[in-house]
Image (tube, rainbow, N blue to C red):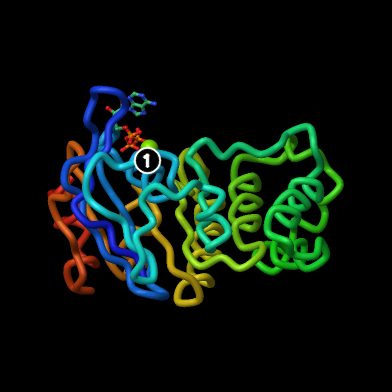
Amino acid sequence: MLQVIGIDAAYGHARVLHDVSLELEEGEMLFIVGRNGAGKTTLLRTIMGLLRPLKGSIKFDGGDIAGLSPEELYHRGFRYVAQDKKVFGSLTVRENIEIAAYSSGEPLSRAVDKVLEIYPKMRDFLNLKAGQLSGGQRQILLIGQALVGTPRLLLIDEPTQGLAAVVINEIAKILKRLKGQLSAIIVEQNLPLVTKLADKVVVLKEGKVIATLREASEICNTDLLEKSL
Ligand SMILES: Nc1ncnc2c1ncn2[C@@H]1O[C@H](COP(=O)(O)OP(=O)(O)OP(=O)(O)O)[C@@H](O)[C@H]1O
Ligand SMILES: [Mg+2]
């Protein structure tokens, strides 16, 4: 469904991605791993249309999408959950969900249900200011918002970063439930979680893909993954 073919991306003169390619089939969950500064976020931002590749192409359902705006891609079902986990802190949780409902054209009640389906406890927080949520709850709210409308491709940047083990388990459960229902590209440094959920793993180093793991036997081998980082 998605093909990234030989893309380069840069901030000004600083080239960050070099000839990056990856392929995602419908319903697959692909993880991107790599050290800090490897270019993981830049790759997600480029796929989401926030950064235009200098070369190469990005195809979705067979058509070239490089150059389309994030808004156009949103309407095609792209959903980006950024690394900074930003919510509208002075608005309530319900109002945050309302923004996703408005953007996607989905009725608010259905949008709220989608968030509650992945995390029933959010019902108690609907009228709370989103700024009062914990980091983990915020992350879950953002994933829930990404499910509003008709998502086809989730791009999630480090969903478990900085979270406690209990919350990481909660998020892992949510991702496990989504597996197979949606296509997803997830940046993640938590290798046990990656090996549990990944259909494919792309290892980025200094802006280049140095390994693509497709076989379960390779993906389950955290030693192999650690070595490639
Ligand atoms: N807005 C920007 N302007 C200039 N350089 C940037 C910008 N954002 C990132 N970079 C640089 O691009 C490189 C890749 O950054 P990127 O954020 O994609 O890495 P990352 O793999 O996501 O790292 P992390 O694990 O820390 O999130 C780094 O050298 C970074 O300093
Ligand atoms: Mg990053």
Q: Position of residue 153 (x, y in %)?
A: 47, 63
What residue is shown with label 1?
Answer: 41
Q: Residues within 10 Å of mark 1 (few under 14, many from 20)?
A: some
Count of numbered badges drawn on the protein: 1
Rendering coords of residue 212 (x, y %):
18, 60
Does 108 appear above or below 8?
Answer: below
Q: Residue at x 17, y 67 (%)?
A: 218
Q: Residue furthest right?
A: 127
Ligand 1 located in image quadrant: top left
Type of residue at label 1? Thr
- Locate residue 61: give its quadrant: bottom left
Indicate if the residue with disc 1 has its beta carbon within 8 Å of ligand 2: yes
Q: Residue furthest top?
A: 13
Q: Is residue 156 left or right of residue 23?
A: right
Front-lying residue, 39 or 220: 39
Horizontal and vertical percent position of residue 185:
39, 58
Q: Residue at x 34, y 39 (%)?
A: 42
Quarter of the image holding residue 201? bottom left
Viewer-proximal residue, 123 or 85?
A: 85
Viewer-closest of 67 and 42: 67
* For residue 135, side relative to residue 224 (left or right): right
Q: Residue at x 18, y 36 (%)?
A: 206
The quarter of the rendered structure image containing the N terminus is: bottom left
Q: Residue at x 69, y 69 (%)?
A: 117
